[in-house]
Amino acid sequence: MDRSSVAMGDDVLPHAETIDLPPETSLSDVVAYLLDRHFLASIASGKATWILVADSPLAVVAQQWDEPRYLVDSSRPINSFGADGRVSLMFRYWKQPQRGFQRVSRSADGRPPESSG
């Protein structure tokens, strides 16, 4: 398993880790185990969001939520997400937009819209 870094200081040590679990361990039990071990970094705003991926997205874990939101059946055994007894999990950090961030649409010629005020 591995995870993305959230800041330069988070890159001091590698995040990749190998753990051995019984193949019938459910996805939800694996995620709970990793969360109990504080595998994911927290950020000061309290809103770090992670997407757990194997071959495809499996769950979303957010620092501000009480529980992960699963995109697949969380009772599935972990070995069902890999091959040859090996499963590769990656937590991808999903950066939150900064406070006050606004999308600016552009016209067909690429210019920003004119201010209306």
Image (cartoon, grey):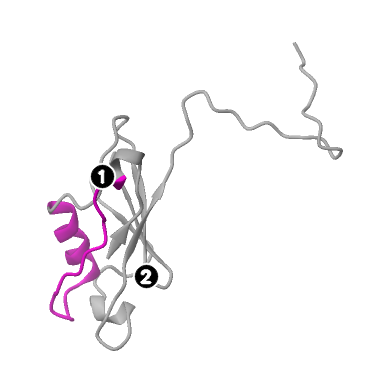
| Residue at x-position 14% and y-position 75% | 20
| Residue at x-position 24% and y-position 85% | 85
Q: Which residue is disc 1 drawn over?
A: 41
Looking at the rendered structure, the kind of residue marked 2 is Ala
Count numbered badges in the picture: 2
Given the current orientation, which residue lies at the most extreme front position?
12
Q: Earlier in the sequence, mark 2 or mark 1?
A: 1
In the displayed structure, 99 sits above or below 64; it is above
Distance (Cα) linking label 2 and label 1? 19 Å
In this view, the residue in front, 4 or 51, is 4
Q: In this picture, which residue range is highlighted in magenta? A: 11-36
| Residue at x-position 26% and y-position 55% | 14
Q: Quadrant of the C terminus?
A: top right
Given the current orientation, which residue lies at the most extreme bottom position?
84
Q: Which residue is disc 2 drawn over?
A: 54
| Residue at x-position 32% and y-position 80% | 82
Image position, residue 89 (x, y; %): 31, 67
Could you say whether the residue bearing mark 2 is in a helix, strand or loop? loop
Q: Nearer the viewer, mark 2 or mark 1?
A: 1
